[in-house]
Amino acid sequence: MEASSHDEFREFVAMRSTALLRLAVLLTGGDRHAAEDLLQIALMKAYGRWSRIEQHEAYVRQVLYRQQVNRWRLRRHRAETTVPVLPESDTGTDAGSDSELRIALWAALGRLSKRQRAVVVLRYFEDLPEAEVAALLGCPVGTVRSTAHRSLAKLRALVPELGPEGPSDRVQPLSYTPKEVQR
């Protein structure tokens, strides 16, 4: 790899790794160690092709999604683990009931199946259209729709505060703001 590409890659990792790690944590159901491994694999794959990639972040995100799907398909992948304490947020702390709702929602996401969690994360956290989620997960659009429906119903059952319409307007779902927007 040329020195300019190497420097560009280092700059990308420095600027975007926090947001990409947050996404990986969501995809792995809150398992920060698995998320770090997942992100490391995605960045290693991107590094080898860096000079040929046009949209760096889109490529790394797609590798994250596909690597996570591959992890599900491996029979030797260990069973999902739950953790009693949630990882600390990089964005600071919230006050009041919004924090409690976020914690409850985070715990509920961890109780979804891996496929359900992926659909929820891609569809609602990443705000991807159903067709794109289906293409990333390698399943029909109808499967994405039915999985999203069942996932949201399960989340509402696990976190009754969400209600039939989802969280209230005052509560923002687990989200991130890309650095480009923060400036």
Image: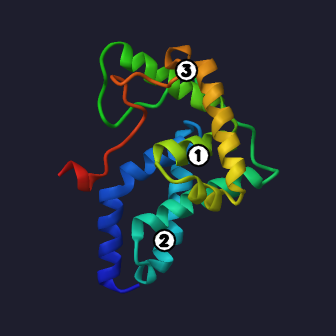
Characterize the local packing of mark 3: few (<14), some (14-19) or many (20 or more) Cα atoms within 10 angstroms: few
- Give the colour scheme shown: rainbow
- Residue 22, image x and y in percent? 44, 44
Residue at point 46%, 31% (across, down):
87
What is the three-letter code of the residue carrying label 1?
A: Ala
Characterize the local packing of mark 1: few (<14), some (14-19) or many (20 or more) Cα atoms within 10 angstroms: some
Residue at point 66%, 56% (across, down):
137
* N-terminal label among 1 and 2: 1
Question: Along the horizontal axis of the image, is 139 left or right of 25?
Answer: right
Of the 4 image quadrants, the one containing the N terminus is: bottom left
User: Circle 1 sits on which residue?
Assistant: 34
What is the three-letter code of the residue carrying label 3?
A: Pro
User: Circle 2 sits on which residue?
Assistant: 46
What is the three-letter code of the residue carrying label 2?
A: Ala
Residue at point 29%, 82% (across, down):
4
User: Circle 3 sits on which residue?
Assistant: 164
Residue 114 shows in the view: no
* N-terminal label among 3 and 1: 1
The alpha-carbon separation of the residues under discs 2 and 3 comes to 41 Å
Mark nearest the camera among 2 and 3 is: 3
The answer to whether residue 129 is above or below residue 107 is below
Characterize the local packing of mark 2: few (<14), some (14-19) or many (20 or more) Cα atoms within 10 angstroms: some
